[in-house]
Amino acid sequence: MLPNGYSDVPGSKLAAVVTCLEMRERPALRPERSAVPWTLRRVVEPRTEWYRDLFRRVGLEWLWFSRLTMPRSELEQILGNPDVEIHALEVDGHDEGLLELDFRQAGQCELAFFGVTRTVQGTGAGRWLMNRALEQAWSRPIERLWVHTCTHDHPQALAFYLRTGFLAYARRIEIADDPRLIGLAPADAAAHIPIINRT
């Protein structure tokens, strides 16, 4: 049991509140733009450099770090697993969105990574990509689709997932090294989360 009140976090660390969400049945798709300029492209066994570049471009502003700190061999095992689907949102020949679906647990799918770059934010690309995610996930015989988001994510992310049909089932605290202080992200990334450069 965690005590009530405040707890100090070292300046070199970040603390985030993580919300875990799930859906147990296929939802109706929410309205999306018609005649869109983007397409969804499945990337089978993507190159690690390509993946990490898109991961950074989508997640840098939200301090995504897990796939940057992961050993290369471990990441390559995930990316090469036939039960892990990697998709890119493509716009005019450029990859501007990442969708990763993890089916490695029988009967379930984790929406492991989902997001679009700043280039297409606010255009409806996120809703379009989510509808494709739901179609892809529920095309398999699953009983549960789950995802988690945190307070470092886009400020509308949690509401977006709830509107999509996910229900919150758990809340956690995540403590991690600030990726800006260990060379994984530039110091000016995620300006909404100030650096506290103390130990």
Image (cartoon, helix red, strand yellow):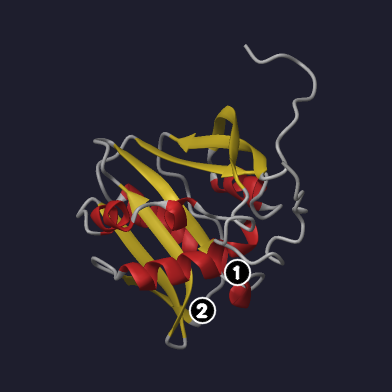
Tag 2 or tag 1, which sits nearer the N-term? Answer: 2
Amino acid bearing label 1: Gly
Q: Nearer the viewer, residue 137 or 13?
A: 13
**Residue 75: which quarter of the image?**
bottom left
Residue drawn at x 41%, y 57% as measured from the top left: 133
**Disc 1 vs disc 2: Cβ atoms closer than 8 Å?**
yes
Give the SS element for disc 2: loop
- Mark 2 closeness class: few <14, some 14–19, many ≥20 residues within 10 Å: few
**Residue 174: which quarter of the image?**
top right
Q: Is residue 195 above or below residue 119?
A: above
Q: Nearer the viewer, residue 19 or 122?
A: 19
Taking the image as shown, residue 189 lies to the left or right of residue 94, namely right
For residue 106, which numbered disc appears in the image? none
Give the percent coordinates (x, y) of residue 151.
67, 44
Residue drawn at x 28%, y 45% as measured from the top left: 103
Residue drawn at x 59%, y 55% as measured from the top left: 179
- Figure quadrant of the C terminus: top right
Give the percent coordinates (x, y) of residue 134.
41, 53
Taking the image as shown, residue 131 lies to the left or right of residue 107, namely right
Q: CA distance from mark 1 to mark 2?
A: 9 Å
Identity of the residue furthest to the top in this view: 1
Q: Is residue 116 visible?
A: no
**Residue 104: which quarter of the image?**
top left
- Mark 1 closeness class: few <14, some 14–19, many ≥20 residues within 10 Å: some
Amino acid bearing label 2: Val
Q: Which residue is mark 1?
A: 124
Give the percent coordinates (x, y) of residue 190.
70, 60
Give the SS element for disc 1: loop
Residue drawn at x 63%, y 57% as measured from the top left: 62
For residue 36, which numbered disc appears in the image? 2
